[in-house]
Structure formats: C-alpha cells, structure tokens
Amino acid sequence: MTIKAILFDKDGTLLDYHATWTEVNLKAATTAARGEADLARELLMLADADPETGRAEAGGLFAAGNSAEIAEAWISQGVDWSRAALIACIDEIFTAAMQNAVPIPGGTKVIKSLSAQGYVMGIASSDSAAAIKVFLDHAGLTENFVFIAGYDSGHGHKPDPTALLAFAEELGLAPHEVAMVGDNIQDLQLGRDSGAGRVIGVLSGTGREQDLSPLATDILPDISHLGRFFIDFV
C-alpha cells in the first residue's frame, strides 16, 4: 500500500508529553483555582493527573482533551470563571508552553527527512491551532507541515475522523494513502474510523502498548523510527 501523506498527533508524538506538560498542567490547575491549593488538587484529579506532580494519565482530559473540555469540567467543579474566560486562559497557558516544548529526540531530523522524500505532513491535535503553530516554529518544522487541525479549527474533536478526511481531501488523496501517527487511543481511533492506510501507535506519550495495539497496524517506540519504517511503504 502506497502512503503519500502522514497526519501526526502533537503531544506525546512530536513532543515529549511529560517533559513538556507536567509543570504546565500544574500551572493551569493552580491558575483556574485562583491559587486555592485544595481546589487545584481537585482540578488535577478531575483532569486525570497526579495532584502532586501534574503527570497526566492516558486518555484523560489533560492527555486527550482540549481546553474547552477541561474548562467545562473545572467549571462543574466550582471554579470562579466564565466558560469563555477560562477557555481563553487555558489556551494562553498551553500556547505559551509550546515555546519551551521538548521535541522527541531524533524526531525533528526524521520529519525533515520524510519531507525531503516527498511525504506531505499535517498535524491533528487537541491543542489549539495557535499552539500548534508556536510549537512548529519553536521546533523549526513550520515549512514541513502543510495542514494544521487544532480543536478550534472546525474539524471536530478526536476521535472524530474529520481532520484526516479534510487533510486527504485537501491533498487530493484517498484516506488509505494517508498514515495516522499518535500516542493515544483517540488518535488511533481517528485513523481507523477515517480509513487511514496505516495507523501507527508510538509509545513516547501517555498511551500504553496493550491499549494501542488493538487499534494500531504498527507500534513504534517513537517517531525517530519512522524513517526506516516508511521505506517499505514508498
């Protein structure tokens, strides 16, 4: 099967989730709680994160949700914010964090190599489109990605397959000519539901192999292994 394009998740796939997000999760919860320590702990647990460290669990709100979903959950817990203001606040914190994001070791080199080989690449993330753009600029990868789908880009929320279908349509490709790469069940379900040609799980984020394997056509340690892997599908 010929793969011509690759749609990537961002957090845990292109960047090291825990190294990038753990402190940011703590900051978001503390800010939303307006400094009330007990409430911040409750918010972290509600978002499926360790209340002491901020380390997120697979499939939880921090690992797989978006700013709107996090805000709605926290408002239901009693934080003193309007929905719009809290979403904007979380988006601002998350976007700023991308200026210090930690790319997957070897990942930037592989992305540039795949681009040079002619693969067309895009990103579908639960983060905002603005945050994706900041990350790509920070990582020096802006020119290597032609398609960006954040939670606020109008392509639905994962695992909605709309982002991959829109990416394929924009390129004039069939979905089976696109590979989906991600670290979470939601990413791989998106790939399956869209009819992607390859659905590749990576173990560099919050997802575990036993959870990803039923949905994946392939499992890799991280995206640094993609260069050699894709030689078989050119």
Image (cartoon, rainbow, N blue to C red):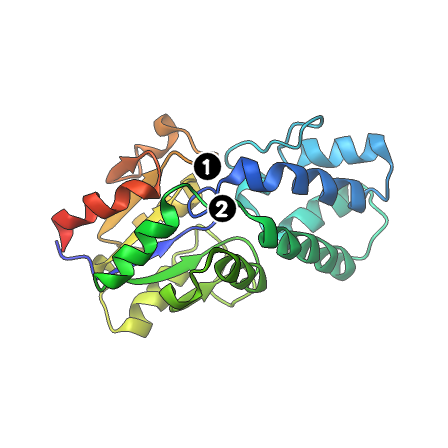
Side (left or right) of 221 relative to 140: left
Q: Secondary structure at mark 2?
A: loop
- The residue sitting at 55% across, 48% down in the picture is 101
* Residue 135 point in image, percent of width and height: 52, 57
In this view, 203 is above or below 6: above
Discs 2, 1 touching: Cβ within 8 Å: yes
- The residue sitting at 66% across, 47% down in the picture is 70
Name the residue type under label 1: Gly
Quarter of the rendering occupied by the C terminus? bottom left
Q: Secondary structure at mark 1?
A: loop
Q: What residue does disc 2 label?
A: 11
Examine the rendering and report whether any part of residue 189 can be seen.
Answer: no
In this view, 148 is above or below 197: below
* Residue 177 point in image, percent of width and height: 21, 60
Which of 176 and 141 lies nearest the eye of the viewer? 141
- The residue sitting at 26% across, 45% down in the picture is 226
Q: What residue does disc 1 label?
A: 205
- Splitting the image into 4 quarters, where does residue 51 fall? top right
